[in-house]
């Protein structure tokens, strides 16, 4: 996996500025077509931890999600957006999850679909160190390309959350607290997160670090201006860069 990353400066969530920053990130790797690599079904996975407004910095900003989706749609892909909370993974919960954080509007603006598929599939973790099997959301398992669009935040348990931990949202609803109980130690939980990320195998990752969250993350910190959008093929390299940005 290529470990090179691209950091694009971006000081606000003005749509034109974000579009330009996201385009610069993709251009750093040969353009969005090179990332798409012939795939047609693209699943964009933002961090929608909780139904909060974008200004809280608890979730990936909808303007960033819209910019990423637009780039793939223009390249000819079918794009869907999905996430899952730590509670019941139901259509009612998804409506709340897409509403307040602005995903419904972002999808409407760019022509992406919001996924309300609440089914899951058991997937083998062939590269796993600490787990050998995990349930993943069906759209994740069936996508040609999964794109992690994460939020830069501090985290009360794991210290930091970024592109790797964003893939934990691919685990359906109430399976998340089960894994928390199964791996109560911080290091073991971190290994499990890496195993999930390796299994999902996101084709490209983008970090919304224009405004991050500092403090009692992942849900209750304070917005912190960082001024960057980071992208690359390796979510691990991006998370390393996020440490320096923080």
Image (cartoon, grey):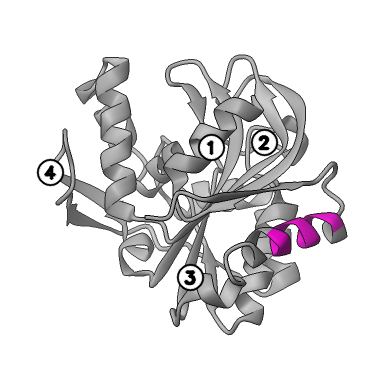
Query: Alpha carbon of mark 4 to alpha carbon of mark 1: how far?
Result: 25 Å
Q: Secondary structure at mark 2?
A: loop
Q: Quadrant of residue 25?
A: bottom right
Work out whether residue 126 or residue 79 is closer to the camera in this orientation and state it.
126
Q: Quadrant of residue 75?
A: bottom right
What's the magenta region? 17-24
**Marks 4 and 2 close (CB-CB < 8 Å):** no
Question: Which residue is identified by label 1?
Answer: 49
Work out whether residue 13 or residue 106 is closer to the camera in this orientation and state it.
13
Query: Alpha carbon of mark 3 to alpha carbon of mark 4: how far?
Result: 26 Å
Q: Position of residue 198 (x, y in %)?
A: 29, 48
The reply to whether residue 188 is visible in this rendering is yes
Answer few, some or many: residues within 10 Å of disc 1's Cα (few below 14, many 20 plus, some between 14 and 19): some
Q: Check the picture and name the quadrant holding the N terminus.
A: bottom left
Q: Secondary structure at mark 1?
A: loop
**Marks 4 and 1 close (CB-CB < 8 Å):** no
Q: Which mark is residue 132?
A: 4
> Is 69 on the left or on the right of 41, as rendered?
right
Query: Alpha carbon of mark 4 to alpha carbon of mark 2: how far?
Result: 34 Å
Looking at the rendered image, the disc whose residue lies closer to the viewer, 2 or 3, is 3
Q: Position of residue 155 (x, y in %)?
A: 52, 21
Q: In this picture, is 148 found above or below 76?
A: above
Which badge, 3 or 1, comes first in the chain's sequence?
3
> Is 64 on the left or on the right of 197, as rendered?
right
**Marks 2 and 1 close (CB-CB < 8 Å):** yes
Question: Which residue is identified by label 2?
Answer: 52
Q: Magenta stretch mostly in which secondary structure?
A: helix
Question: Which residue is identified by label 3?
Answer: 42
């Amino acid at each position: 996996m290529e470990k090179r990353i691209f950091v694009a400066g971006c000081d606000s969530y003005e749509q034109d500025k974000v579009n330009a920053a996201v385009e610069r990130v993709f251009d750093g790797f040969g353009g969005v077509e090179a990332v798409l690599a012939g795939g047609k079904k693209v699943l964009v996975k933002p961090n929608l931890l909780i139904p909060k407004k974008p200004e809280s910095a608890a979730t990936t900003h909808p303007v960033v999600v819209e910019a990423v989706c637009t780039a793939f749609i223009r390249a000819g892909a079918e794009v869907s957006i999905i996430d899952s909370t730590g509670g019941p993974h139901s259509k009612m919960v998804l409506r709340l999850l897409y509403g307040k954080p602005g995903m419904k509007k972002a999808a409407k603006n760019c022509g992406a679909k919001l996924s309300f598929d609440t089914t899951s599939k058991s997937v083998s973790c062939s590269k796993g160190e600490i787990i050998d099997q995990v349930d993943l959301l069906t759209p994740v398992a069936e996508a040609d390309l999964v794109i992690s669009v994460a939020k830069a935040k501090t985290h009360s348990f794991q210290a930091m959350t970024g592109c790797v931990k964003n893939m934990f949202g691919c685990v359906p609803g109430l399976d998340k607290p089960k894994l928390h109980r199964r791996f109560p130690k911080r290091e073991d939980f971190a290994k499990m997160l890496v195993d999930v990320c390796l299994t999902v195998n996101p084709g490209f990752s983008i970090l919304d670090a224009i405004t991050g969250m500092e403090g009692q993350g992942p849900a209750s910190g304070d917005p912190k201006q960082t001024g960057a959008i980071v992208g690359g093929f390796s979510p691990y390299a991006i998370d390393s860069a996020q440490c320096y940005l923080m």
